[in-house]
Image (cartoon, coloured by chain):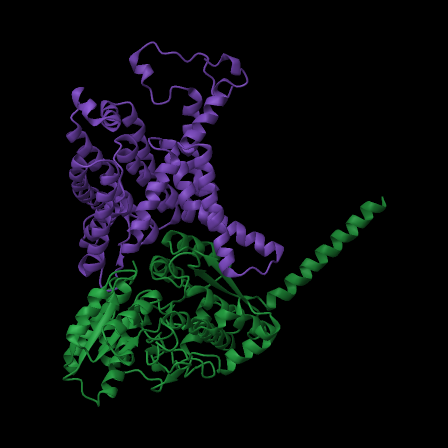
Chain colours: A green, B purple
Amino acid sequence: MKIRQHIRSVAIAAALMTSATVASAQDKEPIRFGFCFDLSKSYTFITPQLAQGAQDLAMYVNDNGGIEGHPVEIIVRDHGNEPQRGVECYEQLKRDGVFAYYFASTPVTNAALPRLMKDGNILMQSFVGRGDAVDGEVFEWVFPIGPTYWQQSANDIAFIKDQMGGDLSNAKIGFLYLDYPFGQEPIEVLKVLSEKEGFDLQLYPVPLPGTDQSGAWSKIRRDKPDYVISWVWAGAHVVASKEMRRNRFPTDRYLSVNWLNEVDLRNIGAEEAKGILRGTNVAGGQDIPIIRTLLDTYYANGKGSGPEILTQDVYYNMGVALQAAAHEAARLGIQQHGSPLTAESMKAGYESLVDFDADGLMAPITITPSDHGGGGKTRVEQWDGETWVPLTDWSADYLEEVWDVIRESSSKFSLE
Amino acid sequence: MFYRLSGVYHTSYASDSRIFKVPADRNLAVFFLLFGLAAPFIVPSIYLNSYMLPWLIWTAAALGLNLVTGWAGQLHLGYAAVMAVGAYSAVHAARFGVPWEFALIIGGLASSVIGSLFAFAALRVKGLYLALTTLAMQFIMDWVLHHSPTVTGGSHASLQSPTLALLGQPITSDAGFYYVAFGWCVLVTIFMLNLKRTGLGRALVAVREKDYAAAILGVNSFYYKILAFAASSFIAGVSGALLVATFFFLATPEQFSVAVSIQALAMVIVGGLGSIIGSYFGVALILLVPGVINNLVAAIAHTLGAQVNVETLAHIPNAAYGALIVIILLIEPLGLGKLYGNIREYLMVWPFDQFRK
């Protein structure tokens, strides 16, 4: 008899408690982000840092009252860079109430894009997927914050032009790239610019995964380009650096895509890497207010979302920056359209971001309904043996030429 | 007891060559057929469109690979390339305005032509050499796809597929896509079931066991090898096209990369060479289990409230999945199909084991 009473009172208490939590959760519905990442196959040199940065920022936001009172939840899942599993991850999380996704893998992003566009969910696709998705008029739901590879390469050309005294008509620029869509993408814009500025463009394809570059570099030695723009990543930079030394190509004429991180630098050797140039839209290093705050609040007490070594990586900063932009979009969305946040209001929030730079962490972005990339500003930094020294201010050039290419490509997309 | 044999005896060749000789097998098949038909009404949509649909299409594809590898004994490491040919041809045809019914057939035929080219290599080399030749074909196809923007759809290499429409009906719902996949898988399965008991199937097996012995028996191995490659490529092509039309909605080269070829071969080997039911199991294991284990591990970590690093969380399922494949192949080297066969054989006379001959 007594036991039964006990059970009943416990059951009633439990029921009361659940209803109470439901009531409080209703006005403070968490904002969920779905990160379907490749954490086990091809992109593992980027994704852990990205996820950790985003998680740390979410933790910090939650500890400080959330976004307008809403806690942030980041759901990280592995898809092993398989399109099929990426789609499965999307379909699963969609049913769990997630409406903002980041896939961090081009094959998976492409596979999920038609579904996201149809369902009207936010796709954060910085640095992955199709470059023409910055055209917000066609790709309403896609937000590739940061430069496209087209804009980034155009900015690189502008930097070289500046370095060479404002005239490229006698210049010879080499383009070293991994011979698949990632590396091939900038070629179109480079060709357009080469016609406009009159420089001689030389292409040096290297086969995946970029470990064999000897053929390309002996051609570079013969051609003697003024600068080599390099569209390779991870270990391929280390190989390129060895080849540069062997072929006596000056390191400070090697301008890398944004995918060159501290691990690559360590592998090249801090001294050997002296002079290397990198285009980036995120400030590297730890002397940035928000990164300092995260390090002091969590890592100093051993409470970070992952190993501290990963925080010393520019991709960690990138993860924080992209998440910061997403949080700001969510905040603006709630302010404008009230809670709970929906995909529509978050889209409106994104589109009202003006000169947002996450307190000096990233290039200022201004997103409009037609430009979902935020302006595509980057800067060129140089490694001086200890730290990255910015050589230019955040800027974006040749906008007209790049947008011609973007519109030409996006006009072919139609959602059936 | 479950597979009752009493009353099953054959008095004519026709009855002896029936597809299902044991009534229980037929009943099981009918049950699953009915289940498959009813699935959109009873299976939650998440399982329907992101598990069952790719599973059925890949099973059809794996059966095609089983035809050339399991039946005709020709190791094929370039199967995804053949699927790519079908997918791209069909999508281009559909974009050009050809009705989907014909676009799918065009895709299948284009795959047949390219796939038969592989067969010419198969006529000269065997075993590992053939594996390498087909692997080379895969790399050539990868290279071609990465370097022909006109085929793959511009510098981003993603080609949108027009809305699938069959018999004048545009198909847009999850259930519609599922039925297309289901129909195709059933069609291929029926073809394979019948292949087993026809002269063609026996000729292929003869070629597999020893091609010159087959030649002595009057089986033209040249002809049958080409036939096997052409038929399997046709299935590959249509499956590839359907995968794009009903699941991805756009084609990219990564969907048909060398890794996918190896996965396809793994499906067939883990499932069991020359086993139809094994192909179903093999595809489920290779294609679906990684995702399932991944969700399971994530759910366990979530309920335990464990603060597990995201990377560790991603690698645990991979380790478990790898171990699972090794364990299965250790228990039964002939694959999951044989494993099922063992169970069936055991139950055939259970509980009267002593009556087993």
Residue B350: x %, y % from top left: 52, 19
The residue positioned farthest toward the right in the image shown: A2
A82 up-or-down from B226: above or below: below
Give the tally of numbered discs: 0
The answer to whether residue A53 of the structure is visible from this angle is no
Work out which quarter of the rendered image holds the N terminus of chain A and state it. top right
B50 up-or-down from A204: above or below: above
The answer to whether residue A268 of the structure is visible from this angle is yes
Q: Does residue B150 appear left or right of residue A16 in this picture?
A: left
B265 up-or-down from A330: above or below: above
Residue B314: x %, y % from top left: 48, 56
Q: Does residue A140 appear left or right of residue A73 in this picture?
A: left
Residue A327: x %, y % from top left: 49, 74
B288 up-or-down from A157: above or below: above
The residue positioned farthest toward the top in the image shown: B11
Residue drawn at x 34%, y 65% as measured from the top left: A235
Residue drawn at x 56%, y 59% as measured from the top left: B308
